[in-house]
Amino acid sequence: MTVAAESTSLHNALRMTKVLKVLGITLLLGGLGHTVGIVRFYLTSGIPEANRVMVDLWVAEAQLLAGGLYLSASRPGHAVAAWRPLAGFGAITAIGFALPSFAFLYSRAPVYFLAAPAVYLLASFFVLVRVKAASETSPP
């Protein structure tokens, strides 16, 4: 790898760590907000059927897991290629949560509830594309 290619690879990795940090914090705050919201809802309205509780737990878990993976991938001190596996798993987790949520939310919830899964989905596809591009340009 040439010096120019190494410099470009390092620059791209540094930019990506900033993106991953923002996505990680956003997902962690979203998971925390979701958890607080459903706990408040359950306290005021009673605990719903088990399926609803499981869906609510799944949403919080997916947001917290993907956010934690993104935030871990953004840590300074990683080697240039070290962010890729964590970011890839974070993206797959967020996509796995957001994609099925669309059909459910579209049919049952107000439109503004679609905004967060849409952002998570688009951002995670972006991360997957960047992970793939970085793995093709960097040696293993």
Image: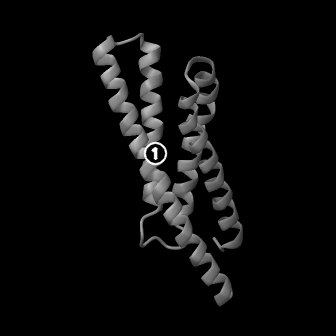
Observer-nearest of 79 and 38: 38
Residue at image coords 61%, 42%: 121
The crowding category of the residue bearing disc 1, from other C-alpha atoms within 10 Å (few below 14, some 14 to 19, many at least 20), is many
Residue at the disc numbered 1: 27
Furthest toward the bottom, the residue is 3
Q: Is residue 86 left or right of residue 123?
A: left
Quarter of the rendering containing residue 6: bottom right
Observer-nearest of 79 and 56: 56
**78 is higher (above) or lower (below) than 29:** below
Residue 69 image point, x, y percent: 46, 52
Quarter containing the C terminus:
bottom right
Residue at image coords 71%, 67%: 136
**74 is higher (above) or lower (below) than 109:** below
Q: Is residue 35 left or right of residue 140?
A: left
Residue at image coords 55%, 69%: 15
Residue 9 image point, x, y percent: 62, 76
Quarter containing the N terminus:
bottom right
Q: Amino acid at mark 1?
A: Leu
Total of numbered circles in the picture? 1
Give the colour scheme of this rendering. one colour
**87 is higher (above) or lower (below) than 53:** below
Residue 139 image point, x, y percent: 66, 74
Circle 1: element type: helix
Q: Is residue 137 left or right of residue 75?
A: right
**128 is higher (above) or lower (below) than 106:** below
Furthest toward the left, the residue is 43
